[in-house]
């Protein structure tokens, strides 16, 4: 009975296939999870109420209080865009980088919604 040594090229190919399969399974397993912007979005309304939203989803349009917000602090790890409308459309937007705060001008409209830049 003769035993032959395994072919090193075949072993490398099998290793590459196994690694690719594992990576594919990992990505597929995580893709269904709802991605969030880690950290809080904190804002102050016209009535001086402070609202904090922790780790909101990075997808979609997020509405602020019905009266809007005069000051918004982005404590998340993702930049946001502030809108003066309730549906994240139109002009007059402001880009708010992570760890920054924006104060709306008293003469302008308050912020009513935001989206994440991703």
Image (cartoon, grey):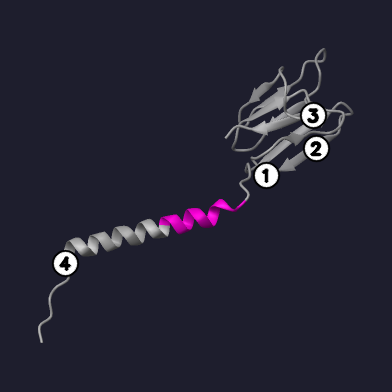
- Eyeballing the image, is 110 above or below 107? below
Stretch of the chain drawn in magenta: 23-33
Q: Contact, CB < 8 Å: mark 2 with mark 4?
A: no
Q: Give the distance between the C-alpha atoms of the residues marked 2 and 3, in whole angstroms.
A: 17 Å
Q: Give the distance between the C-alpha atoms of the residues marked 1 and 2, in whole angstroms.
A: 13 Å
SS at mark 1?
A: loop
Q: Which residue is mark 2?
A: 51
Q: Residues within 10 Å of mark 1 (few under 14, many from 20)?
A: some
The residue closer to the viewer here, 17 or 56, is 17
Quadrant, the C terminus = top right
Q: Is residue 28 magenta?
A: yes
Q: Residue at x 18, y 61 (%)?
A: 9
- Eyeballing the image, is 67 above or below 22? above
Q: Which mark is residue 86?
A: 3
Q: Give the distance between the C-alpha atoms of the residues marked 1 and 3, in whole angstroms.
A: 20 Å
SS at mark 3?
A: loop
Q: Which residue is mark 1?
A: 55
- Relative horizontal placement of residue 69, taking residue 116 as reference (left or right): right
Q: Residues within 10 Å of mark 2 (few under 14, many from 20)?
A: some
Q: Is residue 58 magenta?
A: no
Q: Which residue is mark 4?
A: 7
SS at mark 4?
A: loop
Q: Contact, CB < 8 Å: mark 2 with mark 3?
A: no
């Amino acid at each position: 009975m003769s035993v032959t040594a395994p072919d090193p090229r075949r072993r490398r190919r099998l290793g590459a296939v196994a690694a690719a399969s594992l990576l594919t399974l990992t990505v597929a397993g995580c893709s269904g999870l709802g991605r969030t912007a880690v950290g809080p979005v904190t804002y102050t309304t016209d009535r001086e109420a402070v609202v904090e939203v922790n780790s909101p989803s990075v997808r979609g349009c997020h509405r602020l209080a019905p009266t809007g917000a005069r000051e918004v602090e982005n404590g998340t790890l993702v930049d946001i865009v502030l809108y003066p409308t309730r549906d994240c459309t139109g002009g007059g937007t402001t880009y708010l980088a992570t760890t920054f705060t924006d104060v709306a001008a008293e003469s302008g409209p308050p912020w009513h919604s935001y989206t994440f830049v991703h």
